Every structure is written in C-alpha cells, then in structure tokens.
Image (cartoon, grey):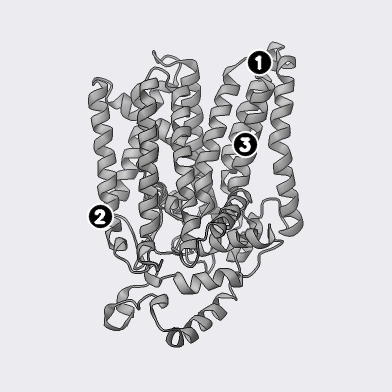
C-alpha cells in the first residue's frame, strides 16, 4: 500500500488542477443557485447566521450585477446581432451605470431561499472570504476566491475516498486506487461552484470511515465514538439533504446496540456510545432549535418550500405521478444519475452535456451496481465480513438517496416553480445526493472489478483509464465554449 501513496498524491494534484481550471473557466453566478449561496456566505461574513429568509444583501448585489452573465439562461439570438453584450466592467461607467442601478434595484426584491441551509459551509466560506480580503484579493477575483475554496476540499475528498477504499478492499489494489481516481476526475459541476454541495461527500466520507471502524470492533473506544459523532454532526450541518444517510447510519449503530444487548456485551460499549450520541446530538439539537425558533420548523425545509411556493399534495394524488410509469421512472432515474455525474450547469439555456452521455452514465451505473449484488450474500466466497457489510451499507445509502428525491418528486405540488415544475415534476439534481458519492463509487468500482474478474489488474486499470479519458473528453467537448468567454476569471482585470 505504501506504493499507492504517490499515486494518491498525484491524483490529489490532478484533482486540484481539474477543479481550478473549470472553476476559473465558468463565468460567475451560474444557474445552480450560485448567487444565493454567494449571498449567504457574505451574510455569514458580515452578520453571522440569518434570522429568517431575507432579501439578497446590497454587498452581494454589487458583485452579482457587475460580474454575472446571462449566458447560462438566455440564447444569444435574444440580443442584437446574436451576440451577448460585453462585460459591464469593460464599459464606460456613465454608459452602464443606470443599467446596473436598475438591475440592483430589481435584485433587492429577491428573497434568498438558501438562508435556511445548515451553517458549516457558510462559516468556512465566510472565513475564507475574509482571508481573501486580508490577502488583497479584490473586485471580481473575490467571488472566484470563494469558488477556489473547493480546491482545498478536493484533495481531502480524494484521500478520504482512498481511506474508505483501503478499509473495504484491503486486498484489492484496483478498487483502492479506482475509487479516488474517479473522485479526482469526476465531471461534477458542483465542484466548480460556490455551494454547500461540495462538503457533503467529504463529511459523509469521514463518517463512513468512522462508522465502519465502529461497527467492526466489539468494544469501540471513546475517541472513536467522539470522532464518529463529530463526523455525523458535520454531515448534518453540511446539508439538509444528507438526513437519509444520517438516519441509516444511526440505524446501523442501533442494530449493533441491539446485538450487544442480546449477547450481554453492551456495558463495555456504553462509554463510546455516550460519546458518539453526545457529539452527534448536541450540534444537531442546537441547529434544529435555531431553525424551529427562526424558520418555524426543525430543519428549515418547510420554510424553503414555502418560499418556493411548494405545497404537499393529498396522499390520494401521489399515485397519479408519472414516476409510476416506465417512461416516468426512466425520466427520473436518468435525470438524477446524469446530473449526479455531470452536474446541472446550463449554457444558453441548454444542459451542458454531450448528447447521449446521460444515458451512458445511467446504464453503466445501474449495470455495475447490479453486478455487486451477488457478492452481498453469505454464500459468496472471497468476500470478507467487513467488506460485505460495507457494500450492503453502500447499496442502502445509494438507494436511499435515489428514493428520497423520488419521494420528494411525488409528494410536492410544485405550482409555478420552474424546476421542478408541474409539467416536469421530477427532481433532477444529482448534486444534492453527493453525500452518497463515496458509497456509490465503492459499488461502481467493485462492480467493474467483478465484471472483469477473469482479467488481471492491467486490463482493469486500462478499462478504468479509458472510462476516465472518455469522461474528460466529454467534459471538454461540452464545456469548450466557456473557456473563451469574456466574463470568466481569465479575462478579469487584475
């Protein structure tokens, strides 16, 4: 395994380069709520946690109206000559000033529906924003500075993925390296955006490490209980949509407790369990109390739904959803898996993907995950108990993430919301299930390993390398128009 460490360091470096290049290439304030996440980070920097769903701040609007582009949302044919106007900072102040004032006045009426999100990412982003100011970063480079915070998270995510794979596959070098390799090159656009989505896979990856160690020992130590509880708390405070993963993790711990009660061994584990639930519970309870007091519910989700105009449909109407038809189910599944791999950026109001890639990602993912299922049964030879347990957990985590957003698609009436909508009532936002990224990649890589079981590691690594090369080429082909865009970081005045 010591020979693998230089490879993981190289993958970490390549992940940094990958995320930096695309973060810099995309213009500011994309279509995936980036203006709202940016505004919330600045609110934390100025005043701490918001006390309600408030309008976008003046400080945020100064950056948004000056440095944003409409190219994410609008076709160039809507402009004279089929060309977008040049960046405002290249125009004389007396010419562009009235337009910017009008846009800022219009933007000041917008409520930031992200204000109810948990605080972990925004506290870190607020601190990073201040560090940027102290370092002399200014103008349009400051919002990009916030984006570049993701560059720090990526090597941590690569190493976390490797640490999980080492625990699950101690005898399988292909799987140990394959999981972090896919993390490093994954074309997920959430990694190039100001957003709390970036923390979910990292926090839950750390949770998975602690959880597997906790479940594998008969008498967990108090430090391990503390670390497991802290990781669970961080996952909860990273993003509300991680709740299914947290609930399943707690359920697996409860099953261990019940087994120890049955065997009369609980007393030895009590100190660790108290430490775990104390470290996990206290931050969660404090945040839920804050949400209940200021937003009216325990997670802030109901307040956000009200801000979007969503309502819960009567139970009798749930079964009329197109999800219960073959076409509707495929629409949901391909939408979630396509955006899980590639993200949701649009360009000229078209999804920024290569045609056919959504189908390929969906079919390949489902095929390789299905290939793992035979290894989950006790009759299967060559699968260690911890590995089987980890694969079962990974499958349940992944299925629960898909099921959670399928249920949300069915339950809500989206009224006048644009996406999801009454016309297209499907969540297609794979970034929101990124907490399950490492569990999914464990399944994906192990499935590939089983499909190629007759071949040696050379063929397996060559196949994985070809997949990664195809991912990169498809990403470059899809995103090529943005690299020369005059609104991006490469064209900002220094």
Q: Residues within 10 Å of mark 2 (few under 14, many from 20)?
A: few
Residue 477: image tag: 2
Nearer-the-camera pick, 441 or 247: 441
Q: How far from the left and from the top, in percent, is residue 27?
A: 39, 64
Q: Is residue 409 visible?
A: yes
Q: Is residue 33 visible?
A: no
Left or right: where 252 falls relative to 65? right
Which quadrant of the figure has residue 437?
Answer: top left
What whole-number distance in Å separates the C-alpha atoms at marks 2 and 3?
Answer: 38 Å
Classify the position of the N terminus by image quarter. top left
Q: Residues within 10 Å of mark 1 (few under 14, many from 20)?
A: some
What whole-number distance in Å separates the C-alpha atoms at marks 2 and 1?
Answer: 52 Å
What residue is shown at x 72% (from left), y 61% (from top)?
51
What residue is shown at x 51% (from left), y 70% (from top)?
63
Q: How far from the left and from the top, in percent, is residue 232?
A: 62, 36
Which quadrant of the figure has residue 376?
Answer: top left
Residue 219: image tag: 1
What whole-number distance in Å separates the C-alpha atoms at marks 1 and 3?
Answer: 20 Å
In this rendering, the answer to whether 444 lies above or below 384 is below
Instruction: Describe the element under mark 2 as helix, strand or loop.
Output: helix
In this rendering, the answer to whether 210 lies above or below 404 is above
What residue is shown at x 27% (from left), y 29% (from top)?
461
The mark nearer the N terminus, 1 or 3, is 1
Residue 232: image tag: 3
């Amino acid at each position: 395994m010591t020979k693998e460490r230089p490879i993981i360091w190289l993958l970490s470096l390549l992940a940094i380069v990958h995320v930096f290049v695309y973060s810099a290439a995309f213009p500011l304030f994309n279509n995936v709520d980036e203006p709202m996440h940016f505004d919330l980070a600045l609110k934390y920097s100025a005043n701490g946690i918001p006390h309600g769903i408030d309008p976008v701040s003046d400080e945020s609007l100064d950056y948004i109206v000056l440095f944003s582009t409409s190219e994410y949302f609008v076709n160039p044919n809507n402009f004279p000559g089929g060309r977008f106007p040049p960046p405002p900072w290249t125009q004389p102040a007396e010419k562009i000033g009235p337009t910017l004032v009008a846009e800022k006045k219009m933007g000041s009426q917008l409520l930031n529906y992200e204000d109810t999100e948990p605080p972990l990412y925004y506290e870190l982003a607020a601190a990073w924003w201040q560090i940027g100011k102290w370092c002399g970063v200014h103008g349009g480079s400051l919002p990009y500075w916030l984006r570049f915070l993701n560059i720090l998270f990526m090597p941590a995510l690569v190493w976390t993925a490797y640490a999980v794979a080492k625990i699950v596959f101690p005898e399988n070098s292909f799987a140990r390296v394959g999981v972090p390799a896919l993390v490093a090159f994954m074309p997920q656009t959430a990694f190039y955006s100001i957003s709390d989505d970036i923390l979910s896979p990292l926090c839950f990856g750390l949770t998975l490490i602690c959880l597997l160690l906790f479940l594998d020992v008969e008498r967990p130590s108090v430090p391990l209980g503390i670390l497991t509880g802290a990781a669970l708390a961080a996952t909860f405070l990273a993003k509300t949509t991680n709740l299914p993963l947290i609930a399943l993790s707690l359920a697996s711990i409860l099953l261990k407790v019940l087994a120890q009660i049955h065997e009369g061994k609980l007393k030895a584990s009590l100190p660790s369990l108290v430490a775990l639930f104390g470290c996990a519970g206290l931050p969660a309870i404090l945040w839920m109390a804050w949400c209940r007091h200021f937003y009216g519910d325990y997670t802030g989700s109901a307040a956000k739904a009200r801000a979007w105009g969503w309502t819960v449909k009567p139970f009798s109407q749930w079964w009329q959803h197109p999800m219960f038809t073959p076409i509707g189910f495929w629409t949901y599944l391909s939408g979630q898996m396509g955006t899980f791999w590639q993200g949701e950026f649009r360009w000229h109001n078209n999804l920024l993907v290569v045609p056919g890639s959504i189908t390929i990602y969906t079919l390949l993912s489902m095929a390789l995950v299905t290939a793992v299922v035979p290894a989950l049964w006790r009759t299967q030879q060559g699968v260690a108990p911890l590995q089987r347990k980890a694969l079962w957990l990974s499958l349940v985590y992944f299925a629960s993430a898909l099921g959670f957003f399928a249920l949300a698609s069915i339950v809500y009436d989206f009224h006048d919301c644009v996406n999801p909508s009454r016309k297209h009532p499907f969540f297609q936002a794979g970034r929101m299930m990124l907490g399950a990224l490492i569990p999914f990649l464990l399944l994906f890589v192990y499935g590939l390993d089983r499909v190629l079981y007759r071949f040696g590691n050379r063929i397996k690594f060559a196949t994985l390398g070809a997949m990664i090369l195809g991912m990169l080429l498809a990403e470059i082909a899809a995103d090529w128009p943005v690299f020369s865009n005059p609104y991006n970081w490469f064209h900002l005045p220094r």
